[in-house]
Each structure stands twice: as C-alpha cells, then as structure tokens.
Amino acid sequence: MTTASMTEDIHIALAPGEELLNVRDLSVEFPIKSTILRRNLGSVKAVAGISFDLHAGETLGLVGESGCGKSTTGLAVLRLIENSGGSIIFRGHDLSEMKNSELRQFRREIQIVLQDPQSSLDPRLTVRSIIAEPIRVHGLAEGQALRDRVDELLELVGLRPAHGTRFPHEFSGGQRQRIGIARALALGPQLLVLDEPVSALDVSIQAQIVNLLERLQNELNLAYLFIAHDLSVVNHISDRIAVMYLGKIVETGTRDALKASPRHPYTKALLSAVPVPNPTQRGLGQRIVLKGDVPSPSDPPSGCRFRTRCWKAQDVCAEVEPILEGDPDHAFACHFPEDA
Amino acid sequence: MTSDTPVVDPQALLSVEDLHVTFEGDEGTVEAVRGVSWEIRPGEVLGIVGESGSGKSVSVSSVLGLLPSPPAVISGGPVTFDGQNLLELSEKKLRAVRGKKIAMIFQDPMTAFNPVKTIGHQISEAIRVHDKSVSRSAAKDRSIELLSMVGVPGPHARFSQYPHEYSGGMRQRAMIAMAIANRQRVLIADEPTTALDVTIQAQILELLEVVRNETDAAMILITHDLGVIAEVADRVVVMYAGKVVESTSVLSLFQNPRHPYTLGLLGSLPRLEVRMDTLYSIPGQPPDMAHAPPGCAFAARCSLSRGRAECRESVPELVKVGDSWSACHFVDEMEIATENVSQEIGLDIRVGKESQ
C-alpha cells in the first residue's frame, strides 16, 4: 500500500468534537553556540515536554508571557521547527516521525496565520498570487477553477475579488490579516495555528478579525490553536485554555473552569493582572502582583519552574517538579494549589 | 445641552488649546492633529485614548517640542504651562522645562536609553543637567536612591550596568526613576506598559501609582488600552482622526459614552470578567489623514450616522452634554445606540448599571 492511499482518509472532514490532534511530551531545544567557534555551550529548552489534545471544530487557547514557548509550540506542531522529543499525532499519524514527502499532504490540513501581516506576505506578489500559491503548489486547481477559488476565498474573509490585483502594502493591517487568513484557508485545512493573530491590531480592528475567525470556525468546522498573550482575547475565543510558563503547561482546562477557579498560582496571578475595563471596580479586585521577572529558559529553576516568583513556594517546590494532574476539563501542576 | 466651547480651567497646570500638527511629505500634507484642546490639573491623571494614527502621541510630543520640524508643522495654541506658552519658548528655555518640570516615559525603554552609557550615568546626567550645583557623587547617591525607590533590586550594582543588561520591566522602572529624578510636576507616559507582559504591566502600573503619591505629580497617560484607563485615569480624552471626540470623567466614559466611537471601542473590548456573546465590531478603518473627510471623520464607520448628510458635510463641534464634552451631531441618540450595542453583544456596556 502506498503512503498516499494509506493516509488519504485524513482529508475527509471529521465531525465536530472528534479527536484531531494529540501532542505528547513535546519538547523543543535550541542550541546555544559560541559566536566564533560555533561550539555548543548548552541549550535552551523552549518547550520542555508538554501534552495537549485538540478536537475538530474546537479552539484551544495557548496563553503565556514572552518566552514561555507558546509560539515555538505552534511552529513545532507544523514542523516549521523540529522538535527534539515527543510526538505530534494528527488523526493517528505521528508527524514528528515523517519524512518531508510524507508530510506534504498533511500540510494541506494544518496551516498557520502569523502575527505580523506586514512581514508574512510577499510584498512583490499580488494578493491573488499570494492566495493562489498554496493551491498551485499542491496542484489542487488551475485556470478558471483557481481564479474562482481565490475569489471565493477573498469573499469568505470579507474582501472583494477586485482587491486581488493589488499588492499587500496597499492594505491596512486589518485587511492584510484577512489576506493572511485567506491564504491559510486556501487548501481547506482542518486546523489553523493562529500565532498572535490580533496582537498587532488596534482594538476596533481586532474585534473585526476575532469575529471573522469565529464565523469561519462555525462555517468551516475549523479547529484553532490560538496562541496569544492577551488573556481577554484568549478567554473570549477559546473553548479550552492551556497556560504556559517557561516551557511547561502549568494549568489547562475548559475556559469556564480556569476562569472560575484557577488552581495554579501563576494562572491566578495572570488573571488578576488583567486590567478590568470598569472604573467602579477599581481597587476592589484582589490583584496579585508577582515579584521579579521570568527566569532565563536556558537555566530554569529546579523543581517547579514558577517557584522563584511564587508566594506559596516551600522547600519541596525546589526539589520535586510538580506534574500536571487532573482530568481533561481541568488539570494543574502545583504542590500547593489554590482552593477550588 | 449648551454649546459653549470648552473654557480653560484657571487651575490647570498644563493646558493645550486648539493645537494643530501637520506633516509635510512628498505625497501631500498629513493633518495628524486637527484642533485639540485639553488641560490637566495638579495631581490628576488624564488618560488620552485612541488608535494608531489618532494623533494622541503626536499631540503630546509637540507640546514638548519633541517633533522634528520639518516635517512637523505646529500651529494653534497656546500651550500654557507656568504662565508661559511652550510653543513660543526658545529651545534653550524649553529645555529647562523638559525633563525638569515635565518628564516623559516612553513605550520602548530600549530605544529611549542610550545603549553605550550605563543606566546610572544617564540618570545622574538627567539630574545634573538641570542643576549644575549637584556634585557627581551626590547625583550618584540620588540615582541609586531613585533606582531603589522604583524597585530595581541591587541598585548599587545596577547603577553601573548598561540598558541591555536590564530586562524590559527593569528598564521601564529605570526610565520611571529618570522621569521622577527632578520631582517633575507633570509625567507624560506614552503607552508605558504596551511593550510589557501582563504581570510586568501590573508591576509598572502599581509603581506609577506609588511614584505619583510620593511626588504629587500630575500624569498624562497615553494608551489604547481601555482597561488601563479604567484602572488609572481620573479624566479621559478620546481621540479619533486628530480630533477630540469625547472628553469626560472616567466614570462617565464607562457609564454613559457620549460618542459613537467611544461606544464602539467599549463594545469591541473582549472582557475577562463577564461573558459576552460576540464583540461589537466597528466596520471599516480610520480615514487616511492625508485626505481627511470634510464632515465628521467617523461618519463612514458610525452606527448612528446612517449616512445622514449632516455627518458627511459638517464637522461636529465639541459641546457639553451632561458632565461630558462630545463632538457628535446626534449625541441625543446615544442612549438608544448604547442599548442597541449592548443588546448585540449580550452585555450592558454601561458599567455599574446594576448598582445604581
């Protein structure tokens, strides 16, 4: 049996809620090299063994601060960077083991939208060529069929077919993000990795794109891995949320479980740090202001990685690394969790 | 409703009247600020909200003479501080105000510091440049004291470090230390927490509060984040396309938005604390300021205007409505508009409604 026929079934859509992606013990290391002799001086474990599942038609929000490994995770899921351990299983097939030729047909099903629509679109190509390129590369359509498909995609993201002849610089940030989304949808994927898709946009434009993403998800039964640092946005769009800190998932669960009773101190601090757009609540909420900065991922603290900033840390936190325990609806990695 | 134009408050510490800033470029003239007025009283926090290109940063930078001219052309005014019109001061006299009486905290502390000089050197310099009588060692002691006050750990060692050796949050602390070095009376913070992670943002907001309490400085906070505004500001000016569209107390802004743009912003805000069905989305995008529309700049995106000729043809003046100033021809329809948006997003936008 050829590889093609073996995996042909992956292009058939799943029913909402069926398992689409299982990430297990994923880790990604970047070597630190000396500048002159290129000797290995060690490594940064950007992602240090994380696991999560994603179902068809569902949004998993991956949230955390700069350097927590959330974007690296997104890139590793697409194998745009290589993982150093663990597995990425898309509908039963382990992507991390695949050769590039095998991986190709999976690329149709997993696409990415990047933060900066300025640098992620080729400035010398027309919008039409940008969106048509993946379709052409995969040989899915040509001629009139290709033109029709591009028109359809432009309309799907709220642009007009006439926009196709223009170049990226002629568009505003929000419109460019729409073009990036149209390109990501060109191959009819089942999973979109959205890496900070609205962080660079103004609030009124951000709402347009968030609403567009929600509409597309309903219409096309898309699963989203939504990576962002903005908890309000992640909370608004996600069904489930995973909170990352220094390369680890410290807490994960349904949005409501996480918001109603955060168990990991970091989640609690993160939630409390978000400014509340309500002046009548000023000073009423219990704000936990964490001390200090995130430690360097090249030399993470022993035991629990959060312990250096945690107000509850005890000796055991430095010695024993807490493991993520619980059920799919709510799990957390802490020796001294907050009360439910 | 009365139609008086805003009168400058005699108690104002710093006031800006009818400020215009244009940029002359190859492709024509961009009107970045088109007649902006505001004032700040002692000890007050004035929030200036608006999106990219609304003119919020430009209007404040021009007050301090921080815009290179050309291309910037500043007209209108006066900008009154301490009985002087800052726009008419010589560069030398302005320098005595800037950094000594009015200080600026920038968004990106990496580019605001000189990378080849130590943080300590730069803070000491900020002290000594305004007061030559301070000795080097006294300036050093004061700098270390300031670093310690803003919560930089190990200030003695940190004094001799370079900006790149500081983390983003630490650099912002150091910048705040420099901004308060001369017990300035006005602090201008331009997106001071935008480049920072949320836990660090919380630290910096807390620090700004502490610093203000200790120095009694008034603060102008420029931000696009309505959450930060709600937490920090006393009064708010909302800018759109180079104009003030609403000016009011922070409570009124969130309880009774008096301009459709403010309403749109409140509705498009994803909220952590409450459940909402969908976000309100303001259609379209801000106008190109090289070709500003003749009437109300917001008309094309406005849910209230619905293409009415008045909006397209005449520029609405800022008029007093209740406790607020609003620049909208149909401000008396705001209540119903607020209800409509609230219904659409499944959340009553008017905060504190339940407690009234």
Image (cartoon, rainbow, N blue to C red):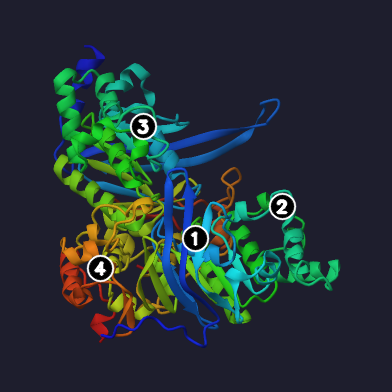
Residue at image mark 2: B162
Which of the two labelled residues, at mark 2 and mark 4, occupies the earlier sequence position? 2
Work out whether disc 2 and disc 4 sit on a shared chain. Answer: yes
- Whether label 1 touches label 2, CB < 8 Å: no
Q: CA distance from mark 4 to mark 3?
A: 42 Å
Q: CA distance from mark 1 to mark 3?
A: 42 Å
Residue at image mark 4: B260
Amino acid type at mark 1: Val
- Using the rendered image of the protein, determine whether residue B7 is visible from the camera's viewpoint: yes
Quadrant of the rendered image containing residue A258: bottom left
Amino acid type at mark 4: Pro
The chain identifier of the residue carrying mark 4 reads: B
Horizontally, residue A104 falls left or right of residue A49, namely left
The chain identifier of the residue carrying mark 2 reads: B
* Quadrant of image for the N terminus of chain A: top left
Name the secondary structure under disc 1: helix
Residue B103, position in %: x, y?
A: 62, 69
Q: CA distance from mark 2 to mark 4?
A: 47 Å
- B86 or B98, which is in the foreground? B86
Q: Nearer the viewer, mark 2 or mark 4?
A: 4
Residue at image mark 1: B58
Residue at image mark 3: A78
Work out whether disc 1 and disc 4 sit on a shared chain. Answer: yes
Q: Nearer the viewer, mark 4 or mark 3?
A: 4
Q: Answer few, some or many: residues within 10 Å of disc 2's Cα (few below 14, many 20 plus, some between 14 and 19).
A: some
- Whether label 2 touches label 3, CB < 8 Å: no
Amino acid type at mark 3: Leu
Residue A150, position in %: x, y?
A: 20, 30
